[in-house]
Image: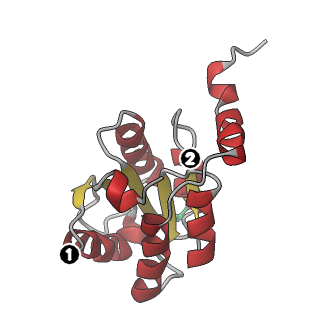
Amino acid sequence: MSTLAEAGRRVAVGSDHAGLELKDHLVAYLRDHGFEVEDVGPASTASVDYPDFAQQVGVKVAATAADWGLLVCGTGVGMAIAANKVPGIRAANCFEPHTSALARAHNNANVLTLAGRMLAPSYAEQVLRAFLDTPFEGGRHQRRVDKIHHPETTAAD
Ligand code: RB5
């Protein structure tokens, strides 16, 4: 088992207009801490649609062009719903560090979504840090994570 920082340092990041400010803060935080960040945007607060950015980040993670994904919208909810439609993605919307640690330890989450309108930047750093620092536990959790993806590989009747 390894932490995210040991397992891979490439993070794909995106937001919508509501998440832009926190996204930019966390891009700087990640770069300051040695991560390689690909910021898919947006670059301004003009109104955009969160699924466009969730899908870009999700595809990069699923294709292993990025090791991890970070998405920020107003609540984090829309980003999680949209990212989880990309096969291979396990996106978790987390509001505090214990949950983001468990999203890694038990769910092997590969994308973290955050609420730009509800989290203070310094607290969001803690939520992100817990995600980055926590390895997947494997074992019984691997079987359950495998089952999450069964609908992606099983043809509909
Ligand atoms: C945008 O107003 C808002 O709906 C979006 O940022 C997000 O919170 C959706 O889940």
Query: Does 103 sit left or right of 66 as displayed?
Result: right
Query: What secondary structure is marked by label 1?
Result: helix
Quadrant hosting residue 150: top right
| Circle nearer the N terminus (1, 2) | 1
Of residues 103 and 15, the one drawn nearer to the viewer in this rendering: 103
Residue at the limit of the structure toward the right, as seen here: 157
Respond yes or no on whether mark 1 lies under 8 Å from ligand 1: no
**Which residue is disc 1 drawn over?**
32
Color theme of the render: secondary structure
Mark 2 closeness class: few <14, some 14–19, many ≥20 residues within 10 Å: many
> Where residue 55 sits: x, y (%)?
43, 42
Quadrant hosting residue 38: bottom left
Label 1, label 2: how far apart the Cα atoms are? 26 Å
Q: Residue at coordinates 60% horizontally, 50% vertically from top-left?
A: 81
> Where residue 52 sits: x, y (%)?
41, 46
Q: Residue at coordinates 63% horizontally, 70% vertically from top-left?
A: 99
- Up-down relation of residue 127 to residue 102 (above or below): below
Query: Does 40 sit left or right of 123 as displayed?
Result: left
> Where residue 50 sits: x, y (%)?
45, 54
- Determine which of the numbered discs, if any, sits on residue 90 in the image: 2
- Quick check: can you spot residue 15? no
- Up-down relation of residue 114 to residue 151 (above or below): below
- Quick check: can you spot residue 109? yes
Q: Residue at coordinates 40% horizontally, 87% vertically from top-left?
A: 122
Query: What secondary structure is marked by label 2?
Result: loop
- Determine which of the numbered discs, if any, sits on residue 103 in the image: none
Q: What's under tag 2, amino acid-wise?
A: Arg
Mark 1 closeness class: few <14, some 14–19, many ≥20 residues within 10 Å: few
Q: What's under tag 1, amino acid-wise?
A: Asp
- Up-down relation of residue 14 to residue 85 (above or below): below
